[in-house]
Amino acid sequence: MEVNAALLLRRVRQEQPVVHHLTNWVTIYECANVVKVLGASPVMAHAREEVADMVSLAHSLVLNLGTLTPELVEAMKVAARAANARNIPVVLDACGVGATPLRDRKCRELLEEVRVDILKGNASEVARVAGEAVTTRGVDATEVAGDLAGLAIRLARERHLTVVVTGPEDLVTDGRVLWRIRNGDPMMARVVGTGCMATSVIGAFAAVEPDRAMAAAAALVCFGIAGECAAKGCLGPGSFKECLYDYLSHLDGPTVARLQKVAGCAVSTSSPTAP
């Protein structure tokens, strides 16, 4: 199985989709920037009174629980219902889930009250959503024992969505196919915001590709390659973000085809265990 990340990158730049965010206040600037340099158009509207109207202008919706409040989550529900009605893909970043009961509860409410198409998180966040007894250290992942790919496949099937697990090796599955992406650089974990930025990139790709797993895998490939190139061209964490924007903006098809490290395989329908 192959993912044509270069083709989807070109489609994002050609179609210039609008990606509506209700996102993390800590990283909202980075999320807007990464969508813009990618070639798409970011909107960051949070007011409950206008989110449904803004969704009507968008091609995808990104929700991020990083700086959640109960009021913000209610606005997320309004936006997501509007997106569901228009068949606009909804991407949910389970940022910090597993750290507090409030985050666990509000994430569960979103998953149960609206249709989420792509759920993204680190290993402990996704494991917590799946019902595992793990905790998250702030927004940083903690170790998850056992078969993480199998857990993601089971969650994807139970919730009828695509699950994205980020880490040294990213995992993407819709319960039928499993993608393993090995692009990226350790520098990406040394600065605040790259996880939220990855979610925004996924939102841009999902806006142009109806195969949610394919879109998420392609997004992580391109974002990871830009991260690899930026790490080689920067002096440290401070200049890394500037380089990341530059390399993502100039990323081209031949570079993606040459550097992508992604493998996909079909998953047996009889077992949630990953191949």
Image (tube, grey):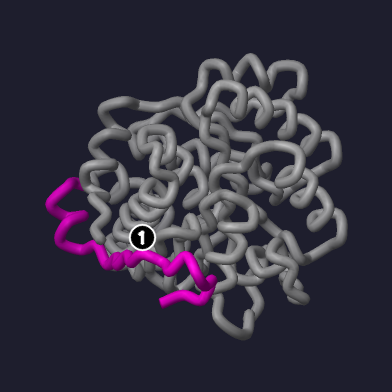
Residue lying at 77% horizontally and 51% vertically, measured from the top left: 108
- Residue 184 visible in the current orientation: no
Residue lying at 71% horizontally and 46% vertically, measured from the top left: 111
Quarter in which the C terminus is drawn: bottom left
Residue lying at 61% horizontally and 42% vertically, measured from the top left: 116
Residue 104, picture quadrant:
bottom right
In the rendered view, would you say 25 is above or below 240? Answer: above
Q: Which amino acid type is marked by label 1?
A: Gly
- Residue 245 visible in the current orientation: yes
Measuring from the top left, give residue 171's x and y in whole percent: 45, 66
- The stretch of residues the image draws in magenta is 252-275
As rendered, which of 55 and 112 lies closer to the eye?
112
| Residue 161 is covered by the magenta coloring | no
Q: In this view, does 207 lie to the left or right of 9?
A: right
As rendered, which of 200 and 124 lies closer to the eye?
124
Residue that mark 1 sits on: 224
Measuring from the top left, give residue 132's x and y in whole percent: 73, 73
Q: How many dots with numbers?
A: 1
Quarter in which the N terminus is drawn: bottom left
Q: In this view, does 86 lie to the left or right of 26?
A: left
| Residue 262 is covered by the magenta coloring | yes
- Helix, strand, or loop for circle 1? helix
In the rendered view, would you say 65 is above or below 89? Answer: below
Q: Pointer 1: residues within 10 angstroms few (<14), some, or many (20+)?
A: many
As rendered, which of 92 and 179 lies closer to the eye?
179
In the rendered view, would you say 45 is above or below 228? Answer: above
Q: In this view, does 272 lie to the left or right of 171?
A: right
Measuring from the top left, give residue 227's x and y in whole percent: 35, 60
Q: Residue pushed farthest bottom? A: 145
Q: Is residue 26 left or right of residue 42?
A: right
In the rendered view, would you say 168 is above or below 219? Answer: below
